[in-house]
Image: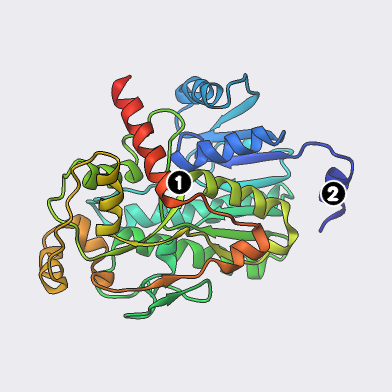
Amino acid sequence: MSVKLYEIRKNGIMKKILVTGGTSYIGKHCIAHLLDKQYIVRTTIRDIKKAESVRADLKKYLKKDTILEFFEADLLKDEGWNKAMENCDAIMHVAGPYPMNFDGPEENQIKPHEEGALRILKFAKLNNIERVILTSSIAAVWMGVPNDKDLDETKWTNENTKDIDPYIKSKTIKEKAVWDYVSKNKSIKLTTILPPVVLGPGIGDHMHATSMKFFNILAKREMPIAPPIKFGMVDVRDVAKMHVAALEKDESIGKRFIISENTYWTKEFAKMLIKIGYNAPTLTPPSFIVRFIANFDKTLKMVKPVIGLDYNINSSSAKSILGFDPIPFEKTVKDTSNYVKSIEAS
């Protein structure tokens, strides 16, 4: 640990943290958790006009006024990053697009992730910022070996897999790129956080977020079947907590952490939704039929390699090092439902 960070902790002085992606579903929760723990926080957003709505959302969620600095910056441009990082002690790089049905050139999905992450690290080095916590994804792990049934942080997705989804490819390329950069720039102390499907209440209106779209696909029966697909699930509040835990624990430096409450078949998720009043689908067709349908359905195509695959996700490292004690998924489902209903009623 550097003398700088040690002295800051030792003397109880609040550290200044930059969170990228301040308008995002996960980003707002990271900001809220940091503010709640008395950190000084600043954030980047692509459109500075959205600053007041973010501030209002956080005030309502935390039930108190907040001090939060905003900086306009884009992952594909150099402008704004140097100013945003000035005098910061650490960075949480959360920003990055996550479209459910990406349609366009593959490079348009990959560039913000790969180039954006490398831009963050380069400016961090210029500003003598050692500590970086980066939001990756289970997507960078779960398609590494065909039919791999036991996923942990040692596994990597093969980004050269034929017909791999652009999002999965982008997350994998991004994380590999940052670890490669850090291997050549030892001053950067990196930790990556790898959540699976993230649900839970948003801060403000996040009905456009992929997480809420995924919830509604089943809850509102937008998909008439419960495909034979297993998903890792985690609460967004836990994702934020683990970002902060990684920041506060030096044992996390140089490590990847998968954070998953557990894995659930789509039908199991649907039954939880039925239990709280939704008319979710429970019909599960044979895997070979769903694989065929996936050739024509963009949503299913993304997860085609794991259709019918019964696999496990190991989050023991996060539990032992970061103190990961996940919110039960049934509570996450209920809280997500209450959040969706509150937004729809407003």
The percent coordinates of residue 177 (x first, y second) are 51, 65
Q: Nearer the viewer, mark 2 or mark 1?
A: 2
Q: Is residue 199 visible?
A: no
For the C terminus, the image quarter is top left
Q: Secondary structure at mark 2?
A: helix
Colouring used for the render: rainbow
Which residue is the site of mark 1?
76
- CA distance separating discs 2 and 1: 30 Å
- Mark 1: give few (<14), some (14-19) or many (20+) Cα within 10 Å: some
Query: Which disc is residue 19 wearing?
Result: none
Query: Which disc is residue 4 wearing?
Result: 2
Q: Is residue 1 visible?
A: yes
- Residue located 57% across and 65% down the image: 256
**Left or right for 13, reference 38:** right
The percent coordinates of residue 283 (x first, y second) are 14, 59
Q: Does residue 190 lie above or below 288 as drawn?
A: above
Residue type marked 1 = Leu
Is 24 or 323 nearer to us in this picture? 323
Residue type marked 2 = Lys
- Residue located 81% across and 59% down the image: 1
Q: Secondary structure at mark 1?
A: loop
The percent coordinates of residue 173 (x first, y second) are 44, 65
